[in-house]
Amino acid sequence: MENDEVILLDFWASMFGMRIRVALAEKEIEYEFKEEVVGGTKSPLLLKMNPVHKKIPVLIHNGKPVCESLIAVEYIDEVWKDKAPLLSSDPYERAQARFWADYIDKLYDFGRKIWDAKGEEQEVAKKNLIDSHRVLEREALGDKPYFGGESFGFVDVALIGFYSWFYTYEAFGNFSMEAECPKLVAWGKRCMQRESIFKSLPDPHKIYEVILQYRKNVGLE
Ligand code: GS8
């Protein structure tokens, strides 16, 4: 796969974009990162490449777009299949991994309502977020180092971007993820030691600063 052209339309703080960044890093694929400003004007390239949802991230491989982060991660795993497999070769394990990745996708709204709401709405979101992370910890991770077992895989890729938002959830929700879900936080720390991850994820404090400014702008602070 030499001479492949790989472009990622992304936004630095997007946990969905982080999935694709991590998958590309795991496979050691070089790519061009094109920053979109979420909340700003959408570039003509984004509108052309994702005319349906008009959202980042979009992976563009040799001029062809792949939209939706989990679909893009699976695509990367299939195209560059010789290095660092993310999904198992076993159909049942693949089905389980997809089940949990789908579950993780649904956590976005809880997280969002912690930093984009206040009062009762925020409290309900916080409870939902903690409860669902407890489910992930108990039912999917257990005592394994990674969700798929001994090696880093698809579910880890699906969740790791959210880990860099934990600090923001904790700061605005006034709770400790480590106190609520210690094994999950230990998993996050373990993942952060991988080069593919610490090179692909932003500083959680930077996310917090941007969200704090956002909350001030919309009158939540
Ligand atoms: C979610 C992408 C998304 O929400 C995926 O790729 O997995 N299910 C999709 N993208 C957001 C930025 S990240 O919060 C986005 O592009 N929002 C801009 C908009 O909605 O206009």
Image: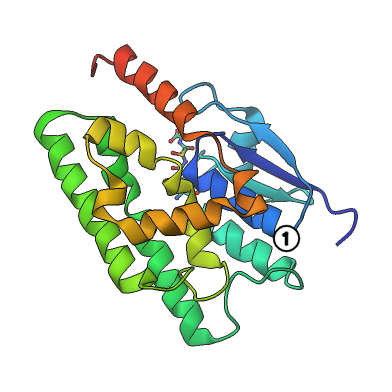
At a point 46% along the width and 54% down the height, the residue shown is 188
Residue 192 versus residue 46 in the image, above or below: below
At a point 24% along the width and 16% down the height, the residue shown is 221
Percent from the top left, x then y, of residue 160? 48, 52
Q: Which residue is mark 1?
A: 27
- The residue closer to the viewer here, 143 or 29, is 143
Answer with left or right where residue 211 lies relative to residue 85: left
Instruction: Sort mark 1 into few (<14), some (14-19) or many (20+) by Cα contacts within 10 Å.
Output: some
* Residue 67 seen in the current view: no
Whether disc 1's CB lies below 8 Å from ligand 1 is answered no
The three-letter code of the residue at mark 1 reads Lys
Residue 158 versus residue 177 in the image, above or below: below
Q: Quadrant of the N terminus?
A: bottom right
Residue 112 versus residue 133 in the image, above or below: above
Percent from the top left, x then y, of residue 37? 54, 26
Dot 1: what SS?
loop
- The residue closer to the viewer here, 187 or 92, is 187
